[in-house]
């Protein structure tokens, strides 16, 4: 029997152990720990990779959303519409700046549904925050049309979206700002917490630079209230090294998705995520391979018994089901989705053999 982890954390290091060791030794020998050249170089590489004017390394992806919202002036009395199918961090960031998270349904491709967003606009709506979940970018034309009609801004939680595109444009670059997470299991993972904000807006960039570093300007003078939320220089150096081979990782993830599609695409009991070539407007990078299944819990138990670890995203709870936080909105489509969804192993290190093994055991479960 095989033992296929959901995510092989130690491979983040072991796959390039000697190169990464040199990168870390170099940073430490220079004593370059906070806001040094490695961070600036990574920010420049990231901005270039995403095709955006400004990128800032932050302490984590959650801080990035909080600081982004502060930088664009979202605060008390404002409402921000976001999908319930997201990590609690998206909604928490809205709450933490004093605004109200308004939760919406996701559509057939698991992404924020523009028609449902339109129904939830009120005079207090300040922003729509699509989440570029699972490594796919939302239909940004549909969301932009809703935003334009009502004069509200778009801001993006692209924590899971690095490298994904809609009509050739990178996730994170559609809104006033976009945020990325470098949590180890994210597409581009570092060895701890890390995040970024990107923006094309010079004024917003200036605010972010102040907010992440105690309100200090380029001369080191405090000109605003700020946080301490800087990406560690050591993590920045690691990320800058890993970014060089990131496009190959993305290609591998897309190949794995295509292999799952070939192996499972005929099963009526499953609803697979869109295939890599399903819609030419979308370039998906498969942060996750999230599918729907009949008899999901039994299928997961069967896979577990055969050494295949799967998980249900957000531990099975979409944001609107956190009643302790005061949510009482009814989202029947999201509820139905969460009775069927789970995620198969998806990462750049999984082998074709392992994918075939998983496919074979799923087919066997359904008697095929
Ligand atoms: C991971 C994640 C975050 C938070 O990022 P951290 O770096 O862990 O703070 C926010 N939103 C989504 C959709 C995420 O997947």
Image (tube, rainbow, N blue to C red):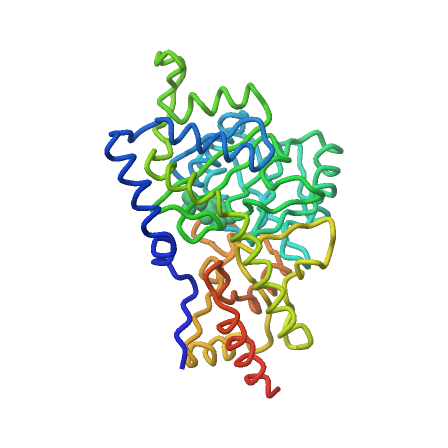
Q: Quadrant of residue 204?
A: top right
Above or below, comparing residue 45 to residue 113 in the picture:
above
The residue closer to the viewer here, 333 or 325, is 333
The residue closer to the viewer here, 334 or 135, is 135
Q: Quadrant of residue 81?
A: top right
Residue furthest to the bottom in view is 367
Quadrant for the N terminus, please: bottom left
Above or below, comparing residue 193 to residue 177 in the picture:
below
Quadrant for the C terminus, please: bottom right
Q: Where is residue 236 shown, x and y percent of the image? A: 38, 36
Above or below, comparing residue 47 to residue 165 in the picture:
above
Q: Where is residue 275 shown, x and y percent of the image? A: 67, 61
Residue 248 shows up from this direction: yes
Determine the residue positioned at 48% across, 65% down.
Answer: 345
Q: Where is residue 212 shown, x and y percent of the image? A: 40, 27
Determine the residue positioned at 74% across, 41% down.
Answer: 141
Q: Where is residue 67 shown, x and y percent of the image? A: 46, 30
| Count of marks, rendered view | 0
Determine the residue positioned at 54% across, 32% down.
Answer: 47
> Is residue 65 toward the left or the right of residue 23 in the image?
right
Residue 326 shows up from this direction: no
The residue closer to the viewer here, 335 or 167, is 167
Determine the residue positioned at 37% across, 17% down.
Answer: 216
């Amino acid at each position: 029997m095989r033992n296929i982890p959901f995510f092989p954390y130690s491979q983040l290091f072991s796959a390039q152990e000697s190169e990464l060791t040199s990168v870390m030794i170099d940073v430490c020998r220079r004593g370059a720990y906070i806001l040094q050249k490695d961070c600036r170089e990574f920010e420049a590489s990231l901005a270039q990779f995403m095709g955006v004017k400004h990128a800032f390394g932050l302490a984590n992806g959650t801080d990035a959303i909080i600081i982004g919202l502060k930088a664009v002036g979202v605060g008390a009395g404002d409402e921000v519409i976001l999908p319930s199918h997201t990590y609690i961090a998206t909604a928490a960031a809205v709450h933490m700046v004093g605004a109200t998270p308004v939760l919406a349904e996701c559509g057939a491709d698991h992404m924020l549904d523009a028609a449902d967003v339109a129904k939830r606009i009120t005079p207090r709506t300040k922003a729509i925050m699509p989440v570029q979940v699972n490594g796919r970018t939302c239909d940004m034309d549909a969301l932009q049309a809703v935003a334009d009609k009502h004069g509200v801004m778009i801001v993006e939680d692209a924590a899971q979206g690095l490298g994904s595109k809609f009509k050739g444009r990178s996730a994170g670059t559609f809104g006033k700002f976009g945020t990325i997470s470098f949590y180890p299991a994210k597409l581009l993972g570092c060895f701890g917490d890390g995040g970024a904000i990107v923006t094309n807006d010079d004024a917003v960039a200036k605010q972010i630079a102040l907010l992440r570093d105690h309100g200090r300007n380029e001369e080191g003078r405090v000109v605003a209230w700020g946080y301490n939320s800087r990406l560690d220089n050591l993590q920045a150096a690691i990320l800058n090294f890993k970014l060089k081979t990131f496009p190959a990782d993305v290609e591998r993830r897309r190949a794995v998705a295509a292999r799952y599609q070939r192996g499972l695409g005929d099963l009526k009991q499953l609803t697979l995520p869109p295939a890599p070539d399903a819609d030419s407007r979308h370039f998906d990078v498969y942060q996750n391979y999230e599918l729907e299944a009949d008899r999901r819990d039994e299928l997961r138990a069967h896979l577990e018994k055969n050494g295949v670890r799967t998980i249900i995203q957000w531990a099975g709870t979409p944001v609107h089901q956190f009643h302790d936080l005061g949510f009482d909105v009814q989202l029947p489509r999201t509820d139905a989705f969460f009775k069927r969804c789970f995620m198969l192993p998806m990462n750049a290190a999984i082998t074709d053999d392992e994918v075939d093994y998983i496919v074979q055991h799923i087919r066997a479960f359904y008697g095929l």
